[in-house]
Amino acid sequence: MAGAGPTGLMLAGELALAGIDVAVVERRANQDLAGSRAGGLSARTIEVFDQRGIVERFLAEGQVAQVAGFAMTRLDISDFPTRHNYGLALWQNHIERILAGWVEQMPVTFYRNREVAGFTQDDTDVTVTLSDSQSLRAMYLVGCDGGRSLIRKAAAIEFAGWDPTMSNLLAEVEMTQKPEMGIHHTALGIHSFGREKYDIVDGKITFRDEGPIRVMVPEQQIGGGEPTLQDLREALITVCGTDFGVHSPIWISRFTDMARQAVNYRKGRVLLAGDAAHVQSPIGGQGLNTGVQDAVNLGWKLAQVIRGTSPDTLLDTYHAERHPVAARVLRNSMAQVALLRTDDGTKALQETVLSLLAMEEPRKRFAAMMSGLDIRYDLGEGHALLGLRMPDLELETDDGRMRVYPLLHKAQPVLLDLASGGDFDTSRWEGRIRSVNARYTGVWELPALGVVNAPSAVLIRPDGHVAWVGENSYTGLAEALEAWF
């Protein structure tokens, strides 16, 4: 695969867990990332890491906080029925380092300090040419190489969407004058100053007086090319009246509200994930989280196809399930950008939306969307659980008390029998699924949906989503097992 950012690392780990031979091509010489970059893990991504047994690595370094929000309005999910009813404040450089530490414990080959220069594919393989002229041959190639994805362009996959209407500079720099920390709203747009290290007390961020300053400032025209320190100076003077003596940049980047999505996530033996498949404004912090969840959806499917236990058509469900998720992210990010404009009409709209989000039902619905806890794959009609993420229940088993998510640590599907007697014959799928007889007498409650009828059995996919629900019978279970595994 191309790219060792969060999406590529997660996908490499998923495939390696399934025993697949994985190679990652990465242009950086090591996993170091200049500056802190993006930050924040949503509740659903934290659950995903819990499903793989690595969540404590992230919790040990990040700060638990209510980070879900819509158009700069924080949405509290502390009353949501999940073990992780919060987000995690953690910069991308640390997220990547922790993920890389996990992946490096597995047999994954890295081709660092190189890039994919091109590829060809036929009915059986993909031949990948690297920037040092070396060639690799693989069954599939996945582009996890960012918004400017060479893989997407070389595969001639259309990147449809909307051009940018605004532009911002983001950087980590030194300043001879200390600006006022925090987020500031002006007639020229929103700008902010902060630092990588901070404390969160009662939901409020206090930046520590150490390290470089992280600055975000709008440009009055949509910029192009690689941003420079002079570009940053000019933007600061325009918006703030001074450049604060900015100097010694660690990194400077430009982001816009461009919203684009690959029309197809797959072309033959080439697939896309993460920013290579979808880009949008970083507002709401959905990009990194959506990419990690792409990887978890794709990984087990690709592994089964490579092993020959599932037909190639299983990969079509990756596009069918994940494309609508990112399309919704694009739409809500565009709406958030629109709400942050500074004209009087938009300010009136902001007040209206804010009053709506203060109400219980809208708050729950938007918070579930922004935290990723309401993602439902269209697996047909049936029980309310079907297609949703499985809640991490505390079960009673013959071996004692056990949570659901540890059952998914090896990225294997689980048939959880809760009341039907455990007499369904799973011998046809021996070695492919794990069958667990358990008891759970508590309430089944889902974020935003509320209480649902207790099932008698559930079939849980490796990505944690429910593929089948039993309601006092095994009707449809054999068909679900055949379809997915």
Image (cartoon, helix red, strand yellow):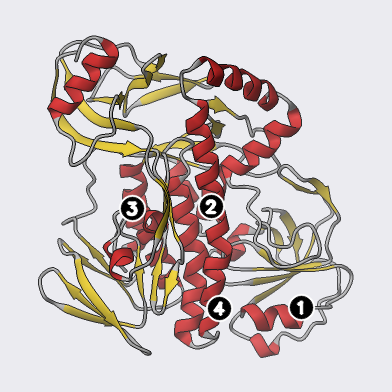
Q: Quadrant of the rendered structure where residue 390 is?
A: bottom right
What residue is drawn where x is 19% and y is 55%?
Answer: 30
The residue pinned by badge 3 equals 147
- For marks 1 and 2, give the one nearer the viewer: 2
- Three-letter amino acid code at the position of disc 3: Gly
Instruction: Give SS at disc 3.
Output: loop
Q: Quadrant of the rendered structure where residue 369 is?
A: top right
Q: Position of residue 48 (x, y in %)?
A: 53, 54
Task: Quote the CA–CA distance across marks 4 and 3.
Answer: 26 Å
Task: Tell me the quarter of the image containing the C terminus.
Answer: bottom right
Instruction: Give SS at disc 1.
Output: helix
Indicate which disc, 3 or 1, sits on the residue closer to the N terminus.
Answer: 3
Task: Quote the CA–CA distance across marks 1 and 2.
Answer: 31 Å
The residue pinned by badge 1 equals 477
Q: Position of residue 214 (x, y in %)?
A: 28, 26
What residue is drawn where x is 31% and y is 29%?
Answer: 196
Q: Position of residue 284 (x, y in %)?
A: 49, 36
Is 389 situated left or right of 296 in this image? right
The residue pinned by badge 2 equals 327
Picture disc at residue 314: 4
What residue is drawn where x is 52% and y is 14%?
Answer: 344
Q: Position of residue 394 (x, y in %)?
A: 71, 53
- Three-letter amino acid code at the position of disc 1: Leu
Picture disc at residue 399: none
Task: Quote the CA–CA distance across marks 2 and 3.
Answer: 15 Å
- For marks 4 and 3, give the one nearer the viewer: 3
